[in-house]
Image: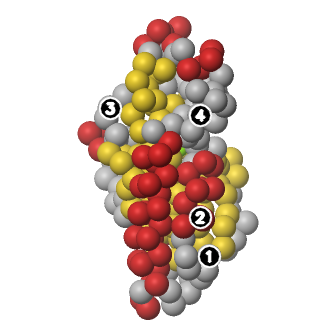
Amino acid sequence: MPGVAKELKEKIGEILFTHDQIQARIVEMGKEITEFYRKPENSDSDLVVIGLLKGSILFLADIIRHIAVPFKMDLMAVSSYSGTSSTGTIKVKKDLDFDAQGKHILIVEDLIDTGNTLAWLTNMLKSRNPKSVRIASLLDKKERRTQEVEVHFVGFECPDKFVVGYGMDFDEEYRGMPFVGVLKPEAYAHLSSKH
Ligand code: IMP
Ligand code: MG
């Protein structure tokens, strides 16, 4: 496959969502988002689209090309993850450049797993008095949820497997793969003590 290192490709057991499937779904999601923010009650103040670093970057770059309403873009970095398991503590590593007050906020995320990150972030942003906070996530691992989060725009439901590619990493690798795949267990066995 062009553009994917053979060393990485070898460690992929299964492709869950191909590049074409992802792109087709993003076109649909863009329409859903556009329609939603065209409504008078959702377009009465600025829309700020916030990408969460680093996992959302490919999804962000693609989805913003299909959001056909005016918006400003910003990036945030929060972290709760190391290796393949959540550490449970959330830190803001990069905050917004914008003042959230009075804005319609759309958080763009790669994947919602336990919901810890987004539940925490949604609450934190709501405390800054925005008009609204909504979430668009490419993938949703619904069965893993331990914290309730309302995800307004979902690309695909994702099985309970560790996935990489299309922005998502394992120890900072695999982010550039144009598809979402599942790692073979042996590819992360050496880190299983972190589970
Ligand atoms: P949550 O707080 O448990 O919902 O997980 C938050 C973040 O962990 C997600 O946005 C991802 O960046 C990362 N994450 C969760 N599951 C996976 C996975 O299977 N592969 C790569 N990253 C993941
Ligand atoms: Mg993420």
Q: Disc 1, ligand 2: is the CB inside 8 Å?
A: no
Towards the viewer: 11 or 23: 23
> x, y (%) of residue 3?
66, 31
How far is disc 3 from disc 2 in space, using C-alphas? 27 Å
On the image, numbered disc 1 is attached to which residue?
Answer: 71
Q: CA distance from mark 4 to mark 3?
A: 20 Å
User: Depth check: 131 or 50 in front?
Assistant: 50
> What secondary structure is marked by label 1?
loop
Q: CA distance from mark 1 to mark 3?
A: 33 Å
Q: Nearer the viewer, mark 3 or mark 2?
A: 2
Instruction: Name the residue beneath numbered marker 3.
Output: 160
Q: CA distance from mark 2 to mark 4?
A: 19 Å
Comes first in the chain, label 2 or label 4:
2
Q: Residue at x 67, y 58 (%)?
A: 75
Amino acid type for the residue under numbered disc 4:
Met
Mark drawn on residue 64? 2
Residue 73: x percent and y percent?
66, 67
Q: Are marks 2 and 1 in contact (CB under 8 Å)?
A: yes
Mark found first going from the N terminus, 1 or 3? 1
Q: In the image, residue 88 lies at what x, y percent?
A: 47, 36
Q: Secondary structure at mark 2?
A: helix
- Identity of the residue furthest to the front in this view: 2
Residue contact at pointers 2 and 4, CB within 8 angstroms: no
**Discs 4/1, front:** 4
The residue positioned 50% from the left and 42% from the top of the image is 19
Which residue in the protein does label 4 denote?
A: 177
Quote the CA–CA distance across marks 2 and 1. 9 Å
Task: Using residue 169 as the reference point, say whether residue 151 is left or right of it.
Answer: left
What is the crowding at mark 1: few (fewer than 14 residues within 10 Å), some, or many (at least 20)? Answer: some
